[in-house]
Image (cartoon, grey):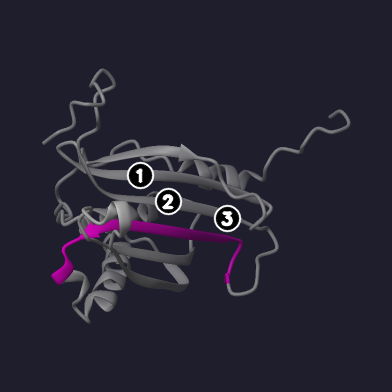
Amino acid sequence: MTLGDQPPPPAAFTRAAESLRLSEVRPEIELEDLPAPQRLAPYSAAIGASVYRDDDELAVGRLILLYDPDGQRGWEGPFRLVAYVRADMEPEITSDPLLGPVAWSWLTEALEAHQADYSAAGGTVTRAVSEGFGNKADDPVTTELELRASWSPAQEDLSGHVAAWCDLMCLAAGIPPLPPDVAALPRRRDEPESDRTK
């Protein structure tokens, strides 16, 4: 190793980061690698996703993996996952006082359904209303749901956690999760990006 070279990341982090990239996702979801935040932990990785119906983007999200071999306060282990989901919603849904608890249950139930063991979960559910004024007065009023959460996975294989996060995004977008005995079809490599499954 020469001066200025970074040592390779720990094997545990490398294995966990590789498990973020699911080989099969629902046809409504597009995953991509994202730059990871550098100051939250010694090692990090991130992926992003969008949920589409036809050509309409219904929800977007980020999932960040943090790894600190020494752990951090509140983590209960060396790994931490940080999730963000934003989805457009109808105004009558965002005004429902039960939306917060229901949206949080989408996450916890998806984690349980995918047998993604975790601890120390916490987060927030936010409803946002955007209304235009001035030269934007004719823009339609939009309402959104934002869910921010973090939890400590109990294992290095994070594929179940990624699948649960994808289910969460689909639920926020109004698309029900696949039954447990139905597998998602892998996207064909030669499929053009514009030919999303309807």
Q: Quadrant of residue 109?
A: bottom left
- Side of 13 where 106 appears, left or right: left
**Three-letter residue code for mark 1:** Ala
Q: Which residue is mark 1?
A: 49
Residue 37, image x and y in percent?
Answer: 59, 50
Which secondary structure, mark 2?
A: strand
Q: Quadrant of residue 116?
A: bottom left
Q: Which residue is mark 2?
A: 62
Q: Local crowd at mark 3 within 10 Å, few (<14), some, or many (≥20)?
A: many
Q: Which residue is mark 3?
A: 66
Name the quarter where the N terminus is drawn: top right
Q: What whole-number distance in Å separates the C-alpha atoms at marks 1 and 2?
A: 6 Å
Residue at point 20%, 35% (across, down): 185
**Three-letter residue code for mark 2:** Arg
Q: Which contiguous range is marked in magenta?
A: 75-92
Instruction: Report the front residue among 124 and 190.
Output: 124
In this rendering, the label closer to the viewer, 3 or 1: 1
Which secondary structure, mark 1?
A: strand
Residue 170, image x and y in percent?
Answer: 23, 53
Residue 103, image x and y in percent?
Answer: 27, 70
Q: Local crowd at mark 2 within 10 Å, few (<14), some, or many (≥20)?
A: many
Residue 42, image x and y in percent?
Answer: 69, 53
**Three-letter residue code for mark 3:** Leu
